[in-house]
Amino acid sequence: MPRPLPLLAALFAVGSLTTGCALGERPTLSAAEVVTDPAAQTVLERLDRRPAVDFTAEYTITPTSTGAATSSTVTRSAGVTTTRIGDVTYTTDAGGSTSTCRADGTPCTDGADDALVSNLGVTHQFWNDSTRQRLATDSARRIGTSTGSTATIAGQAAVCVAIKLPSSVEAVGTVGYCALDHGVVGRYVGADTVIELTAFEVAAAATEPASD
């Protein structure tokens, strides 16, 4: 897994991070709660954009308990999003319906079976929605003012935030988030999981055939 830039490594130190499933079961914000932290708002604004272009993004997902990286590829083409995490592939059509397939030949199933990747501390929406929700929740629980920064991740400009969280059952810690201008996660550093974008490519725009 590519190592974070020195500045972000200092901001996103893993050693004292808060515990809990990295992108899974932390309580979500109620509708009345509003994110007011400026640095977190900057990253949330990027994720709220959602990708407006077709793209391919490659990631590594590394549970801190094992240090073993799992590769993931997210591809969006013609309204269809395909998310491969290890040997599991999730396909979401333009209408929002998702199916789950495995490389072992098991029949595909309707719906997103996120239990198949729960050992990694992520869902199939880790590259945008689930991380965006986690960021909003962490921002509402922060201690003091978060630290904002910028970075270049996989050759792409990104904005980042480091959020210090209050005492939990086991620790006080800091979590880090980065998002690209294109609306995808660039980096997440949490207690249980580290997500790192390793490559990002925007698909070439389709061209209309020349008329006679």
Image (cartoon, rainbow, N blue to C red):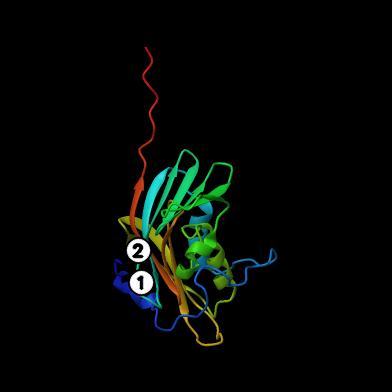
**Quarter occupied by the N terminus:** bottom left
**Quarter occupied by the C terminus:** top left
Q: Locate residue 155 relative to residue 170 in the image: left or right.
A: left
Q: Quadrant of residue 85?
A: bottom left
Residue to which mark 1 is pinned: 8
Instruction: Indicate whether 211 appears above or below 6.
Output: above
Asked if the residues shown at circle 2 and circle 1 are in contact, with their CB atoms under 8 angstroms apart, the answer is yes
Rendering coords of residue 10 (x, y %): 35, 77
Rendering coords of residue 83 (x, y %): 45, 52
Q: Residue at x 40, y 46 (%)?
A: 55
At numbered mark 1, what does the secondary structure look like: helix, strand or loop? helix
Instruction: Indicate whether 209 appears above or below 13.
Output: above
Q: Please, which residue is most extreme toward the top here?
A: 212
What numbered label is drawn on residue 151? 2
Which residue type does callout 1 highlight?
Leu
- Gap in Å between the C-alphas at discs 2 and 1? 8 Å
Which residue type does callout 2 highlight?
Ala
Q: Residue at x 50, y 80 (%)?
A: 19
Rendering coords of residue 142 (x, y %): 55, 77
Q: Please, which residue is most extreme toward the right here?
A: 32
